[in-house]
Image (cartoon, rainbow, N blue to C red):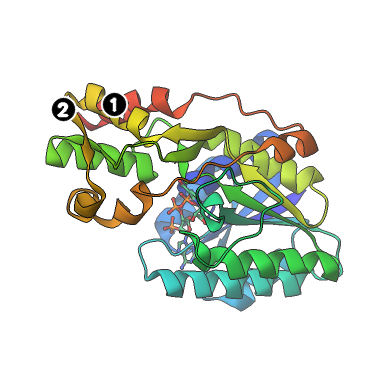
Amino acid sequence: MRVFVTGASGFVGSAVVSQLLGAGHEVVGLARSDTSADRLAAMGAGVVEGSLADLDVVQRAAAASDGVAHLAFRHGEPATLAADTDLQVVEALGDALAGSGRPLVVTSGTLVLSPGRVGRETDKAVPDAPAALRAPSEKAALALAGRGVRVAVVRLAPMVHDAARRGFAGALVEIAERTRMSGYAGNGSQRWPAVHRQDAALLYRLALEQAPAGSVLHGVGEEGISLRALAARIGGLCDVPVGAVPIVQAEAHFGWLAGLVATDAPASSAITRRLLGWEPSHRELIDDLAHFVEKAS
Ligand SMILES: NC(=O)c1ccc[n+]([C@@H]2O[C@H](COP(=O)([O-])OP(=O)(O)OC[C@H]3O[C@@H](n4cnc5c(N)ncnc54)[C@H](OP(=O)(O)O)[C@@H]3O)[C@@H](O)[C@H]2O)c1
C-alpha cells in the first residue's frame, strides 16, 4: 500500500512511518520544512512538501495514495486554531477519498470522553471533556464512512511514551525537577491511560490494513495509571519528596497541566484489541520514566 502520512516527522508519526515501511508499505509524508523532509528521506519515506494550510497539496497527495494516516496537529499554537485546521484537513482528506473505499486513519485522543469513568470505544466525544475541541474532527471523520471512505479514528492515550522525555509524563518530570517536589493533585487517585509509541504505531498499521469503515479505536496500552503512583516513581527517580498538592494550589504548581491533573480519565482498549488482534507489547510507562530522567542528566 502507498500510504500518505501527515505528521510523519513527529513523535508518533515517525514511528508510524517506520512501522509501515517495516511491513513493506510505501510511505509518502507531508513535510513543512527542509528539516522534516530530511528526516523523512533518512527514514526511507517519500516527501510531499507543504503544510496543513495547503489543503490542495494535502488532497492531491491523498488522491494519489492507497490510504492515509493523519497525525499532524498544530501543537504549540492556539488550541481553537489547531482544532479548526484539523477539521478542515479531515474534511479535505474525506473529499479526496470519497467513494474510493480506501482507508483513512484520523487521530484523536481519549480525552474527548467524559471523565470519571473508564472510556470505551463505543462512547461518544462530549463537549465538556478535556480535549472537547477535537470532537468535531472525530465526528466529521466518522461521517465519511457513509461517503465510501474506510475511515477509522484512533483515540490515543494522553501519555504516548518511549525512552525520550515527551508529553504529559515528560512535563510532570520537568515540574518535579523545577519545584523540587513530585506532586499529585488532591488524593492522587486520578488515572490517566498510556501507550508506548511503538504499540501505537502498530495500531495505525493494523487500522490502515484492516479496520472496518467507521471504527473507533483506542490506542491505550495501560488503562489508567494513578497520578499518585506516577508521582511516587518520579519522586524516586528525581530524588525529590513526593506530596499532595491541594486542588486550589494546582495552578501554581502544575501550570498548564493544572486542569488535567485533577481529571480522572481512564480508558479501555478491549474492543480495539478484539477487533484488530492488537496486543501492546512494549515497555510500560513506569519503566520508560527512568530513561526520561537518565536522558536529562
Ligand atoms: N504524543 C502524545 O502523547 C499524544 C497523545 C494524544 C494524542 N496525540 C496526537 O497524536 C498526533 C501526533 O502527536 P505527536 O506527539 O507525534 O506530535 P508532534 O511530535 O508534535 O508532531 C506533530 C507533527 O505535525 C506536524 N505539523 C504540525 N503543524 C503542522 C503544519 N502546520 N503543517 C504540516 N505539518 C504540521 C509536525 O511537523 P514538524 O516536524 O515539521 O514540526 C509533526 O510532524 C497529534 O494529533 C497529537 O495531538 C498525541
Residue 236 image point, x, y percent:
24, 22
Mark 1 touches mark 2? (CB < 8 Å): no
Q: Residue at x 22, y 54 (%)?
A: 248
Where does residue 56 sit, x and y in percent of width and height?
Answer: 63, 77
Q: Does any portion of residue 49 appear in the rendered image?
A: no
- In this view of the protein, which residue sits in the foreground, 134 or 249? 249
161 in relation to 156, above or below: above
Of marks 1 and 2, which one's residue comes earlier in the chain? 1
Q: Residue 247's x, y, as percent?
A: 26, 50
Above or below, 136 relative to 226: below
Give the amino acid at mark 2.
Val
Residue at the disc numbered 2: 240
Please name the residue shown 55% across and 25% down the image. Answer: 282
**Label 1: element kind:** helix
Q: What residue is shown at x 40% (from left), y 55% (from top)?
A: 35
Distance Cα–Cα, label 1 vs label 2 = 10 Å
Q: Horizontal and vertical percent for residue 254? A: 24, 49
